Amino acid sequence: MSETASTIQFFTGFSLNDLPFLAEAAGNTLLISVISISIGSVFGCLFGWALYASKYARIFLGSILDVFRSVPLIIQLLLFFNFFPILGFPLEPFAAGCIVLIVYTSALVAQVARGGIEAVPEPMRRASRSLGMSYFQDMRYVVWPIGARAMLPAWTGVALGVLKDSALVSVLGYLELLRASQILITRTQEPFIILAIVGAFYFALSYPIGKLTAKLEQRWQYD
Amino acid sequence: MIELKNVDKSFDQLKVLKGIDLTVQKGEVLSVIGASGSGKSTMLYCINALEKIQGGNIIVDGVDVHAPSTNVNQLRQKIGMVFQQWNSFPHLSVLDNVALAPRIVLGKTKREAREIAEKHLKHVGLGDKLDTYPTRMSGGQQQRLAIARALAMEPGYMLFDEVTSALDPELVGEVLDTLRLLREDGMTMIVVTHEINFARDVSDRIAFFHQGVIEELAPAKALVNNPQRTRTQQFLSKVL
């Protein structure tokens, strides 16, 4: 028997042909992150407003949000994903991941938004009300623009965190960057290069967010 | 006309205003003096419903300010107020600071609001600052901006709450000059102030507040030059 015939190739090396696969996975990471961060931020701002405005919201909503802030995301994902089949409504990994990430983001953004509203001094709100503005006009034209500037750096931190935490959705089987890298590592046995490339993808996704908000911060400076 | 009838106001247990009776006629300038904590600023807040009252009535142009049926947003359009802290909106240019309320509250178009804002900013001497941001301006300029912002709603009355107290001494003059200008325009004003000489020169009458009551109310010069009540004499001897 010849040497070559006896050797069966289990593993094939990493090649350029694998890049589109990773790029597609990066697209999925981006998709789930954009959906979660944008919808989660809208809810987070509403929750933050409720926390600011109402004592009861602080007690009830506040404690519920604390749960989502405190329980590790991976546990939330597994619990939520496996809970629905029991009820007879199996969820797609993507849908389950989105829902959990949205709730998680909104819990984090709620506290950031509350801080943003509190950053607007009470006397300034009295001044706008004294001009005849209604509560909502004051909120829309004075509190929101000033509060948004105050919360931008903290919000950026949350957004970058959620983008990276979206890797955990891989445990549900959703094909995003981390899961794609695991598949490739299994096939190629070249974890070092693949993890480096995946890291670069994450960086490429995060960097623009940081840059964009830094630019916004600069443009929003009061002068 | 602004009428206060037997107005009581307290913060929890603390009685801040005790049965205040006061009438300010259209065109009149009334200054309010007194020690800190005597209730003079609180009275202003009550007049435009930024604070609730516990007893009595406040009537502005026949409207009961604190009646549940009163639309306070509409009422406040008639009553301009300027505060100790100028509270410029930091995210808006000087022009937009003034144009905002006419646009969103009075429903003026952008262009109309801009014209109104320009007119009032020029009036207070900030015609060359339209596109500046307030954080770039001195306290005195920002306080004049706050005055223009209130005037842009074309109110019938102006309330001034110690508008020079937070200013550096060298900036007090320009703000007082702006108030003198309004007096010449015939604006009805209630001016809470610690500037006794200014109050004497500019107001028609002065009310001296002491611990939540009007201790003495008299024509401006008479009250400062010839106070009748012992407490007024003591207060004036301390501050003059």
Image (spheres, coloured by chain):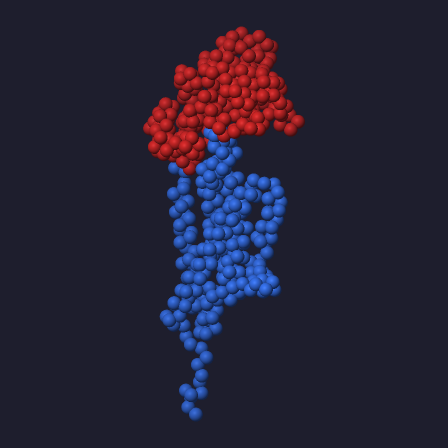
> What x and y, as percent, mark residue B176?
43, 19
Image point 49% across, 34% down: which residue?
A: A134
Chain coloured red here: B
Is B61 in front, or is B119? B61
Q: Could you tell whether B219 is left or right of B145 in the image?
A: right
Q: Could you tell whether B218 is left or right of A19 in the image?
A: right
Labels in figure, total: 0
Locate residue B180: give its quadrant: top left
> What x and y, as percent, mark residue A85?
58, 65
Image point 47% across, 21% down: which residue?
A: B157
Query: In the figure, B147 relative to B209: above or below?
Result: below
Query: In the figure, B92 relative to A79: above or below?
Result: above
Locate residue B13: give its quadrant: top right
Is residue B149 in view? yes
Is residue B36 in view? no
Q: Could you tell whether A140 is left or right of B232 in the image?
A: left
> What x and y, as percent, mark residue B108?
39, 31
Residue projecting furthest to the front: B69
Is B7 in front, or is B199? B7
Image point 60% across, 62% down: which residue?
A: A87
